[in-house]
Structures are given as structure tokens and as C-alpha cells.
């Protein structure tokens, strides 16, 4: 039981940033702009956020410990996330500018961001000596400072209390809120309707008096905000040293979005499937019964990908991308 | 991304050489030491970093320029290109930590007879292993990692841990020796002290790389939550992932044994470290080459307990609960004088367990220590 509980909490840890990034990408794609720069934006969000919580951006504070002692772990974490969100928005603005205003190819501008950001983060870390000591290319992450031991009252609920309200990072709750808000915004608001229209048939939307450029800018900037936050959540949850990498999670999230057929609830399901299978393949020992079968490691590692292919084959028939995603909007063209 | 980084380091280095050549002209020969990193980074808090600290210390003490260079990729072609590059830029002592440099050094030692090579953890040979040859300008340094692993395994069992695990990085000989020694030490202690321990074959693994990653955290969390109490992480930077998992374990006091250098400062969970004194060894050889003017070119230095080149950290980093420093010294002395010959291969381990550890029923575990291909 303890094993299963540990397994499930790891799955949650993995799934939350994956879902947030995928939902971010959804906002952008639904508005008609393909955004494969999620990886790069996550890295920037994590980089700037961690610099902030380590006290590097505030004069007079030298370390993460000092900072948390001053105002508490959770407030520092949330402030760091807000900084990460701002950083994410700024980077995604570059992508929006290139692909909406300048009519550049959306794939190329996003690829430029993905190539530039890790190198820039490493360069800044090393040249400005932002790590623990000069010459190191890694930022220390004092993750245990931000852990919430237990939420009063709620943690007493049997099973769920232990799962959701003990030993969690604040980012977990932010992620849950983001899922709910995304669903409401996309399906229940005027903005959501316009966003979807922009991604399906921008000319019709334009004829109906919607400002396509404005909606697309908003779509891309929201995706940047969510990627920035999720980069921060991911790195705090999974590293004790940040070396300008989110190990491909940004790309995995785009796969999750496609897998989830550009629909928020299906994306949540797809993310849990991915996270569950990946955690299973790395942590077969969570399930003693499976572990003792002595299945060759190679087979276990292949499992998530094999199952993904099977599920894709079965479901891809119904999959459809927003019609105008990736297309440059030209007012004069009909 | 690595390429870009490579260019930065290169630019830095060329600039560095230009600056250094100017002010060291007074010496007979302008020595330039360059270390080329193995897979993993200079800040791995382990193998590369330990070696680099030795190089740096020597360079500072003797006012000789030293640089490091990180190859773009862990391939033979990249290693050879890295050697070409640093030699063309004026390096005349090249330090290469890592077994993976064996064939690159084999080729380059003949190409650059005037350059001194120090190869740690390996001996130069042709790619097909048919010819081993160490030229006069190359010094090989090998450690008896199995002895350090043995001490770690012995200490863990003597301290009362009963469920053990081992996570190695890549399955290279040095890592294998750490693991084999650890298994031998654990079962030796269990037999001597009449303790019962659990060390199943599926708690002995090679992770396949030396880098920290979420996948390794997941794997280590899985082990801890299914009852493993202590994991020996002979895995360079990947050891940081094991420590992260141990820190997150709330059910009990999960422990990690570190590797290569004293890793106690990295995490509260590091109870000890199976060290090899890389920094000391590399400084000794640099002194022999540069200060004494000779060096041990053409030979392989094997460093073990008899030279005090391996061991567990003492003092503040000696965090065992019931296992004492006196007991440690006793076992250490037995290894030092040869009373215990620690096994270094799968076959030796099998014989050792039969003869000295009460022949425990662990054939699967022994098999897991070396894969068939090796």
C-alpha cells in the first residue's frame, strides 16, 4: 500500500507540469499559432524562477534558506512562480511577434527559442557565477524548503488526504486550478469561443468583427505563462540541481496535447496515461508482484511507447487539429 | 546545445592560453595542463570534479596554467578531436579521466610523442582489445575500487542495514569493481557477524548514464518505498537523483552511500562514501612529471588500500551509528595486508562468496554484477 501510494504521488508530480504545459500549448494552437517553443519557455521560466527563489535577483538576500526564513517557504514558491510566469510571457511574446506580426514561419521562430534558451541559461549561469561556486553550470534547488508537510484538516481525510494534502508542493494546487480554469475559459466564455473560431476559420471570425491579431497574441502569451509556471513546478519537483534542462518535457507535453486531441479533458487523461506508464517503466519496483517476475529491463522501458503507439492507432481516426493552426493570417486573402 | 557550450569553452580556452603563454616564459618549458572531461560534467561532484580539483590544486601550487575541456559528445571521434584540439592549442600534459578514453589515447599517444598523457581508470588499447600498449609518454592510473566498495558494503551491514541496493552509472570496469566489492563486503560482514541480509538481484542495476534525471529519481524512490534501506550510488551525477529520492522518503530514514569523493556535503542522507583519492593520485603524477621531470610513463599505477588511495571518509563524514572507526580500521588493515583479497570480477566474486562468506544463495545477484557482453 505504501508502495502504491508513493507510486501514485510520483505520477501526480509528473502529470501536473505535463498537463499545464499541454494546456498552454492548447491555448496557442486553438488560436491558430503552433507553439513548439514550450520546452524553451519552460527552461526560461525555471531558470528565472529559481534565480529568484535563491535570492539572486533581490539585493540583501544571499540564499534560498535566508529567503524562506524571511517570508516562509510557500510565499517564496508562489512569488517565484509569478516571476517564472512573467519570464514565460516575455519569451512567448518573441514568438508571438515573429509569427503574428512579422508573419514568420511559426516552426522556425519556435525552434530558435528552443535552441537559444538552454545555451543562454548555461552561459549566464557560468559567466555571472550564479551557481553555488564559480565555474559551476548548475543552480542549486533547495526543493525541500517548499514542501507542504500537511494541509490542516484536509490531510485527515482517509486515503485522499494522504495523497493530495500531505507532502505536496504548492504547484500541485496551482496545476489543479489551471485545469479547471482552462476548461471554463475554452468552453464557457466569449473569449474561448472567439479563440476557437480563430483557430478554425479566422476569416469567418474576422468577418464577424473579431480582432484576430489580438486573440492570437493572447493565446500565445497564455501559453507562455503556463509553460513558464510549469517549468518552475517541474524543476522544483524533480531536481536538486538545475542545469538548464527540462529533459524534453516541453516536447512530451506537445505530444500529450496531440494525443489528447486538442481537448482539455482528454489532455488530462493522456497526461496521466503518459506519466503513469513512464513512472511504471522507471519504477517497476513499486509493484513487487511485477518486480519479482524478472521481466528484462529493456521490455519494461519499451512499454510506455508501445502502449502509446497502440492507443494512437486506435484513436487517431477521430483526431483533428484546429484547421488554421500554423497558417499565417492575411486579412486580404479569402 | 553541447556544441554551443563547446564553442564557449573553446573560446575561453584559446583566450586563456594566449594570456598564459605570455607570463610563464621564464621556465625551461612552458607546461600547459588540460583535462578533458569524461561523459558527465565538470561539476558532477564526483569523478570529473574530483580529478579536476587535483589538477587545479597542482596548478595553483606551482603556478602552471590548467584548463579543462568538455567534448561535444561521448564518442571516440569526439574524444580524439578533443585531444587534437587541446594539443594544437598548446597543451602538453593531457589528463583524461575515464575508461572511455582508452582507444583515443592508444591512437594519440603515438601521434603526439611529446605530449604527456595521464589516463585514469583505463589502459590504452586498440578498439578490438587485441593489442594493449602504453607508450612512454602515457601514465595509466587504476584504482582498486573493489576495496572501497567492500568497505562500504561491510560498513553498511555491520551498522545494521539489512536491505541493500546498488545503482551503478554506466557499466564500465571501475563501476563494476565498486559494485562487486560492495556485494562481497556485505555478504562477508553478514557471515562474520551472523546477520541476515536481503540483497536480491533486482536491487543491483546499472542506470546506463552518469547524469541526474527524473527517471533515476523514480527508480530510486521505487526501491526505497519497497523497503530498500540503503543504496550505494556509484553513478557520478546520477547519484544526486538517488539522494533526492532518499530525501523525499518519509516512511523511514533512507540512506545513500556516495562515490569517488566524500559526498557528505551534498545531502544529509549520505551516510558514507566509497572514495578513491583521485585528486591525490593525479597531483602525485603531475608532480612526478613536471617537477621531478620524470613521471611514470609507460607504466600502469595500481592504487589501493596499501597506498591509502581508497577508503571511506573519517571524522565528521563518518556517520555510521554502531559501526565504529576502530572496527573500520581493523577491516581496512586486513585488506591492506592482503588477508582479505577483494574480488574484482564476477568469477572471483563467486569464489570469494563460497570461500569467505558462508556461500550465500545469491547466484542471480552475482550474475547481475557483469553483463554477458563484457
Image (cartoon, rainbow, N blue to C red):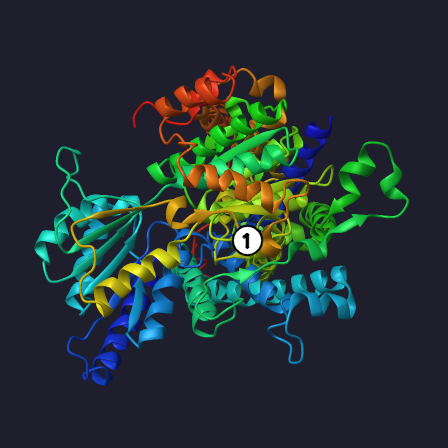
Q: Residue B144: x percent and y percent? A: 37, 41
Q: Residue A5: x percent and y percent? A: 72, 32
Viewer-proximal residue, A129 or B231? B231
Residue bearing the label numbered 1? A28
Say which quarter of the image contains residue A286.
Answer: top right
Q: Is residue B74 left or right of residue B113?
A: right
Q: Residue furthest right?
A: A153
Instruction: Judge whether residue A212 can be spotted in this image.
Output: no
On-image quarter of the N terminus of chain A: top right
Viewer-proximal residue, A250 or A207? A250
Q: Residue B91: x percent and y percent? A: 20, 67
Q: How many marks do you count on the picture? A: 1
Viewer-proximal residue, A317 or A182? A182
Q: Residue, x 24% and y 75% (percent of image)? A: B17
Q: Residue, x 63% and y 49% (percent of image)? A: A237
Q: Residue, x 53% and y 53% (percent of image)? A: B263
Viewer-proximal residue, A253 or A11? A11
Helix, strand or loop at label 1? It is helix
Instruction: Judge whether residue B287 can be spotted in this image.
Output: yes
Q: Is residue B322 left or right of residue B96?
A: right
**Subunit of label 1:** A
Q: Residue A183: x percent and y percent? A: 69, 45
Above or below, A271 relative to B71: above
Q: Residues within 10 Å of mark 1 (few under 14, many from 20)?
A: many
Q: Residue, x 56% and y 59% (percent of image)? A: A46
On-image quarter of the C terminus of chain A: bottom left
Above or below, A12 relative to B162: below
Q: Is residue B359 left or right of residue A19?
A: left
Amino acid at each position: 500500500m505504501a508502495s502504491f501510494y508513493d507510486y501514485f504521488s510520483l505520477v501526480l508530480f509528473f502529470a501536473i507540469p505535463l498537463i499545464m504545459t499541454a494546456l498552454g500549448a492548447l491555448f496557442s494552437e486553438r488560436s491558430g499559432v503552433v507553439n513548439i517553443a514550450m520546452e524553451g519557455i519552460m527552461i526560461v521560466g525555471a531558470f528565472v524562477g529559481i534565480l529568484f527563489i535563491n535570492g539572486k535577483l533581490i539585493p540583501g538576500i544571499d540564499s534560498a534558506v535566508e529567503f524562506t526564513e524571511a517570508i516562509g517557504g510557500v510565499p517564496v514558491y508562489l512569488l517565484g512562480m509569478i516571476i517564472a510566469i512573467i519570464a514565460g510571457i516575455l519569451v512567448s511574446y518573441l514568438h508571438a511577434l515573429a509569427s503574428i506580426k512579422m508573419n514568420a514561419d511559426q516552426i522556425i521562430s519556435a525552434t530558435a527559442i528552443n535552441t537559444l534558451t538552454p545555451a543562454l541559461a548555461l552561459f549566464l549561469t557560468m559567466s555571472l557565477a550564479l551557481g553555488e561556486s564559480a565555474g559551476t553550470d548548475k543552480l542549486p534547488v533547495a526543493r525541500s524548503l517548499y514542501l507542504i508537510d500537511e494541509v490542516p484538516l484536509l490531510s485527515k481525510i482517509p486515503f485522499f488526504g494522504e495523497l493530495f494534502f500531505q507532502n505536496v508542493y504548492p504547484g500541485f494546487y496551482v496545476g489543479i486550478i489551471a485545469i479547471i480554469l482552462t476548461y471554463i475559459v475554452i468552453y464557457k466564455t466569449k473569449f474561448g469561443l472567439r479563440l476557437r473560431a480563430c483557430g478554425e476559420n479566422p476569416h469567418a471570425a474576422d468577418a464577424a468583427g473579431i480582432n484576430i491579431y489580438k486573440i492570437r497574441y493572447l493565446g500565445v502569451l497564455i501559453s507562455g505563462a503556463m509553460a513558464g509556471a510549469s517549468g518552475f513546478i517541474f524543476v522544483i519537483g524533480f531536481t536538486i540541481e538545475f542545469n538548464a534542462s527540462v529533459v524534453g518535457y516541453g516536447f512530451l507535453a506537445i505530444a500529450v496535447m496531440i494525443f489528447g486531441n486538442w481537448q482539455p479533458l482528454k489532455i488530462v487523461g493522456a497526461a496521466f496515461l503518459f506519466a503513469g506508464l513512464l513512472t511504471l517503466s522507471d519504477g517497476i519496483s513499486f509493484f513487487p508482484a511485477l518486480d519479482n517476475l524478472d521481466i528484462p529491463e529493456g521490455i519494461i522501458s519499451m512499454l510506455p511507447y508501445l502502449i502509446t503507439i497502440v492507443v494512437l492507432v486506435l484513436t487517431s481516426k477521430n483526431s483533428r487539429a484546429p484547421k488554421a493552426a500554423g497558417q499565417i493570417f492575411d486579412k486580404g486573402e479569402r | 546545445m553541447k556544441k554551443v557550450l563547446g564553442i564557449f569553452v573553446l573560446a575561453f580556452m584559446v583566450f586563456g592560453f594566449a594570456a598564459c603563454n605570455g607570463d610563464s616564459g621564464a621556465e625551461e618549458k612552458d607546461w600547459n595542463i588540460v583535462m578533458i572531461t569524461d561523459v558527465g560534467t565538470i561539476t558532477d561532484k564526483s569523478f570529473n570534479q574530483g580529478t579536476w580539483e587535483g589538477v587545479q590544486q597542482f596548478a595553483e601550487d606551482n603556478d602552471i596554467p590548467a584548463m579543462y575541456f568538455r567534448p561535444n559528445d561521448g564518442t571516440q571521434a569526439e574524444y580524439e578531436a578533443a585531444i587534437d584540439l587541446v594539443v594544437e592549442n598548446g597543451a602538453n600534459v593531457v589528463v583524461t579521466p575515464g575508461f572511455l578514453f582508452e582507444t583515443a589515447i592508444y591512437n594519440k599517444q603515438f601521434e603526439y610523442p611529446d605530449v604527456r598523457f595521464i589516463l585514469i581508470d583505463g589502459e590504452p588499447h586498440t578498439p578490438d582489445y587485441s593489442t594493449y600498449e602504453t607508450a612512454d609518454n602515457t601514465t595509466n592510473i587504476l584504482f582498486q575500487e573493489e576495496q572501497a566498495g567492500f568497505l562500504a558494503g561491510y560498513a553498511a551491514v555491520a551498522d545494521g542495514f539489512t536491505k541493500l541496493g546498488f545503482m551503478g552509472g554506466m557499466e564500465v570496469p571501475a563501476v563494476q569493481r565498486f559494485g562487486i566489492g560492495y556485494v562481497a563486503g556485505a555478504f562477508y560482514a553478514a557471515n562474520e557477524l551472523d546477520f541476515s541480509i536481503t540483497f536480491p538481484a533486482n536491487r543491483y542495476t546499472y542506470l546506463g548514464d552518469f547524469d541526474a534525471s527524473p527517471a533515476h529519481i523514480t527508480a530510486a524512490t521505487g526501491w526505497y518505498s519497497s523497503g530498500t534501506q540503503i543504496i550505494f550510488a556509484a553513478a557520478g551525477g546520477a547519484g544526486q537523483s538517488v539522494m533526492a529520492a532518499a530525501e523525499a522518503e518519509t516512511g523511514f530514514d533512507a540512506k545513500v552511500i556516495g562515490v569517488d569523493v566524500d559526498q557528505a556535503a551534498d545531502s544529509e542522507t549520505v551516510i558514507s562514501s566509497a572514495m578513491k583519492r583521485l585528486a591525490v593520485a593525479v597531483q602525485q603524477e603531475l608532480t612526478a612529471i613536471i617537477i621531478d621531470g620524470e613521471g611514470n610513463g609507460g607504466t600502469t599505477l595500481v592504487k589501493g588500500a596499501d597506498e591509502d588511495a581508497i577508503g571511506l571518509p573519517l571524522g565528521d563524514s563518518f556517520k555510521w551509528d554502531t559501526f565504529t572507526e576502530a572496527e573500520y580500521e581493523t577491516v581496512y588493515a586486513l585488506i591492506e595486508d592482503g588477508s582479505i583479497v577483494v574480488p574484482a570480477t564476477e568469477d572471483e566474486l563467486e569464489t570469494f562468496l563460497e570461500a569467505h562468506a558462508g556461500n550465500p544463495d545469491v547466484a542471480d545477484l552475482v550474475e547481475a554484477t557483469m553483463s554477458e557482453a563484457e
